[in-house]
Image (cartoon, rainbow, N blue to C red):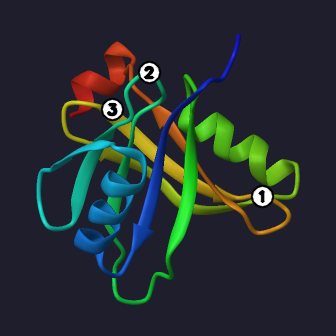
């Protein structure tokens, strides 16, 4: 089974400024659904998001890798020397995501878009 990169995010304190910067620089179409988050269409490339970071979170760039089981992927990441940053968290109408740090401190996202029937029943 492959684990494709399915999303990316750029986060910073001034999301509006970031959205304008990247739209002007690359011609990306950005749907600012709220002041906090905007979905990015890059044309032929992989889409992503530009968001306002919470107060104590520094600016960042991260990728999201699709996995079938967030808990299993987080467990394996920690077994290999990584560290869980955020446990499985729902995204309305999308699925669930989680975050971990690799052994060098890079934050990587995990995305599970399909839920098992037992998970769906629990919601």
Residue furthest toward the top?
1
Residue in the foreground of this view, choosing between 38 and 81? 38
Report the side of 1 relative to 49 (left or right).
right
Q: Are marks 1 and 3 in contact (CB under 8 Å)?
A: no
Marks 3 and 2, Cα distance to the nearest angstrom?
Answer: 24 Å
Give SS at disc 3.
strand
At a point 23% along the width and 23% down the height, the residue shown is 121
Q: Which residue is mark 3?
A: 95
Percent x, y for residue 84?
64, 60
Of callouts 3 and 2, the N-terminal one: 2
Location of residue 58 with respect to 30 vertically, above or below? below
Q: CA gap, disc 1 to disc 3?
A: 23 Å
Q: Residues within 10 Å of mark 3 (few under 14, many from 20)?
A: some
41 in relation to 120, above or below = below
Q: Position of residue 73 (x, y in %)?
A: 67, 37
Residue shown at 34% from the left, 26% from the top: 119
- Of 121 and 56, nearer the camera is 56
How busy is the neighbourhood of tag 1: few (under 14 within 10 Å), some, or many (20 plus)? Answer: some
**The label number, if any, that marks residue 102 in the structure image:** 1
**N-terminal label among 1 and 3:** 3
The disc label shown at residue 44, or none: 2
Q: Are marks 3 and 2 in contact (CB under 8 Å)?
A: no
- Indicate whether 53 appears above or below 102: below
Position of the N terminus by quadrant: top right
Quadrant location of the C terminus in the rendered image: top left
- Residue 90: numbered disc: none
């Amino acid at each position: 089974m492959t684990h494709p990169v399915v999303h990316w995010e750029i986060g910073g304190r001034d999301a509006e400024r970031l959205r304008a910067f990247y739209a002007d620089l690359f011609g990306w179409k950005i749907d600012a659904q709220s002041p906090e988050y905007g979905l990015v269409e890059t044309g032929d490339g992989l889409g992503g998001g530009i968001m306002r970071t919470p107060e104590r979170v520094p600016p960042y760039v991260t990728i999201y890798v699709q996995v079938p089981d967030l808990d299993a992927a987080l467990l394996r990441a920690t077994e290999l020397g990584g560290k869980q940053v955020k446990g499985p968290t729902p995204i309305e109408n999308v699925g669930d995501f989680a975050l971990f740090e690799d052994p060098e401190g890079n934050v990587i996202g995990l995305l599970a878009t399909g839920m098992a029937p037992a998970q769906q029943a629990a919601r």
